Image (tube, helix red, strand yellow):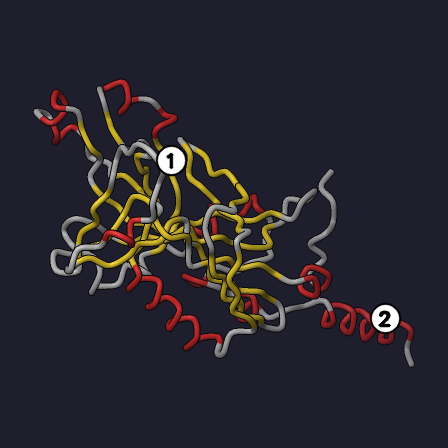
């Protein structure tokens, strides 16, 4: 065999073995994993993924709170989970996008979708007089039981029977604090994680923890929240009214490439 032809054939085999079709690593909103983080914003914009600034402070005392950059977070988000039966004039349900980078590299290997609802921020009496000045909405990491059930059914219809469905008293949480997202471990309440596996990805739905502060009014379609409480905290679902349903805190969806995908795409190349 001609040496040049042999080299081309070998190159074709090697490239083919390390190639993964984009559709096999495409997730919510047609986002493709396995790309450099330097291209993340570019990919989001090319897909017309919306982004906006949200207020993260629960109670706004004065104008300084509004102007303080630490009380705002700007994120890309999904409308796909904003189910028409659950949204209202009072709130929308968004999934905020938090990308995962492989440690030591600049490569995007996953995406966490933080689930939450929006509402108008609580304002001091002085600010209430000029409420139109506050245009941004709060993002609150609580969603009601119906939203969780709809997401679970949606993912079963897409990925089939879960690989596993487990409850645990040890849970990883991703919590919005001021203008950043922090990772915590939690052992205060039982959480549930539903896991699906594909050839190249693991997809999990963490259904959240019983909310201490939040319930959902089924008739009026709005959330009721306890802004301040004293004494021992009790989960809100233990004191539900007839027209209320439970809400769950810090729920999220997590997409992550598995070791096979990372190896085939050579994503573990360390950054210099």
Q: CA distance from mark 1 to mark 2?
A: 52 Å
- Pick the quarter of the image with the N terminus: bottom right
How many numbered circles are shown? 2
Residue at horizontal 21%, vertical 49%?
A: 223
Horizontal and vertical percent position of residue 103: 67, 45
Q: Is residue 197 left or right of residue 2?
A: left
- Tell me, yes or no, if residue 26 can be seen here: yes
Q: Earlier in the sequence, mark 1 or mark 2?
A: 2
Q: Say if mark 1 contacts mark 2, CB within 8 Å.
A: no
Q: Residue furthest bottom?
A: 1
Q: How many neighbours does mark 2 have within 10 angstroms: few (below 14), some (14-19), or many (20 or more)?
A: few
Residue 144: give x, y in percent of width and height.
29, 57
Q: Which mark is residue 153?
A: none
- Locate residue 139 relative to residue 87 in the image: left or right: right
User: Which label is found at residue 73?
Assistant: 1
Position of residue 16 measured from the top left corner of the image (x, y, whole percent): 72, 72
Dot 2: what SS? helix
Q: Is residue 162 above or below residue 248?
A: below
Please report the residue visible at 70 percent of the width from the left and 62 percent of the height from the top. 259
């Amino acid at each position: 065999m001609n040496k040049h032809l042999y080299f081309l054939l070998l190159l074709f085999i090697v490239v083919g073995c390390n190639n993964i079709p984009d559709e096999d690593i495409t997730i919510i909103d047609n986002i493709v994993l396995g790309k450099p983080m330097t291209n993340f914003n570019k990919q989001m914009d090319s897909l017309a993924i919306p982004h906006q600034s949200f207020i993260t402070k629960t109670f706004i005392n004065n104008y300084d709170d509004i102007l303080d950059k630490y009380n705002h977070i700007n994120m890309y988000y999904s409308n796909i989970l904003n189910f028409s039966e659950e949204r209202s004039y009072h709130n929308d349900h968004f999934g905020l996008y938090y990308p995962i980078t492989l440690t030591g590299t600049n490569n995007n290997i996953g995406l966490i979708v933080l689930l939450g609802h929006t509402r108008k921020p609580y304002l001091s009496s002085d600010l209430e007089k000029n409420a139109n000045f506050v245009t941004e909405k709060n993002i609150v990491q609580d969603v009601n039981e119906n939203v969780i059930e709809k997401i679970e059914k949606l993912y079963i219809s897409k990925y089939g029977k879960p690989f596993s469905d487990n409850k645990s008293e040890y849970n990883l949480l991703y919590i919005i604090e001021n203008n950043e997202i922090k990772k915590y471990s939690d052992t205060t309440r039982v959480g549930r994680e539903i896991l699906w596996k594909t050839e190249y990805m693991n997809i999990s739905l963490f259904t959240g923890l019983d909310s201490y502060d939040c319930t959902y009014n089924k008739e009026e379609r709005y959330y009721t929240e306890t802004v301040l409480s004293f004494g021992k905290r009790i989960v809100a679902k233990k004191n539900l009214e007839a027209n209320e349903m439970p809400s769950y805190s810090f729920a999220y969806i997590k997409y992550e490439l598995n070791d096979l995908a990372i190896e085939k795409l050579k994503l573990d190349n360390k950054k210099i």
